[in-house]
Image: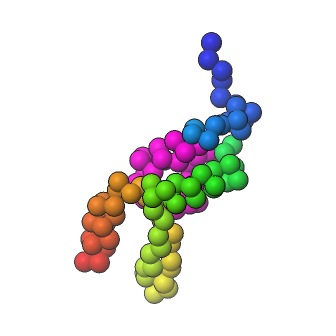
Amino acid sequence: MPEAKTMSTEARSSDSDVRDRIIHQLRVYPVISPTMLQAGLGPYMKARMWRSHLEDLKSEGVIIQDEITSRAPTGRYNTYRRLYLRENVDLIVTMDARSNL
């Protein structure tokens, strides 16, 4: 019988499992913030467990992190960090072009 997923089994996630989960989240949600990545990975996967893997994926060029600034309806400028897979660059370029229309 397969082992049930519990907090203790989540805590023992292997390095490749953590990397796979990060990549999976970015395939499901092509553009997300680091905060939303935490929500997608779940409450039992603490940031200290995945943040170094995210940095490795960014340094390997698998994931891109950038910042965009936009003006809210109130007139205030907000800066947002976003994460996306390199394979989704064309999607990001299209989204950025549409937002500037």
Q: Residue at x 50, y 79 (%)?
A: 78
- Highlighted range, magenta: 18-43
Q: How many callouts does the rendering have?
A: 0
Q: Would residue 30 appear left or right of 97 to someone viewing this image?
A: right
Q: Residue furthest right?
A: 8
Q: x and y percent of residue 35 in the render? A: 58, 60
Query: Would you identify the image quadrant in which residue 90 lies?
Result: bottom left
- Residue 96, given in percent of the width and then of the height, sits at 32, 71
Work out which residue is located at the far top of the displayed protein and give it.
1
x then y, percent, for residue 92 = 34, 64
Pick whichever, 48 or 36, lies toward us. Answer: 48
31 is within the stretch colored magenta = yes
Q: Residue furthest front?
A: 60
User: Which residue is more in the foreground, 18 or 56?
Assistant: 56
Image quarter where the N terminus lies is top right
Residue at image x 27%, y 72%?
A: 97
Camera-side residue of 100 and 17: 17
Please tell me whether the stretch drawn in magenta is mainly helix, strand or loop. helix
Specify whether residue 74 is in view: no
**Does the magenta-highlighted stretch encompass residue 99?**
no
Whether residue 42 is visible here, answered yes or no, is: yes
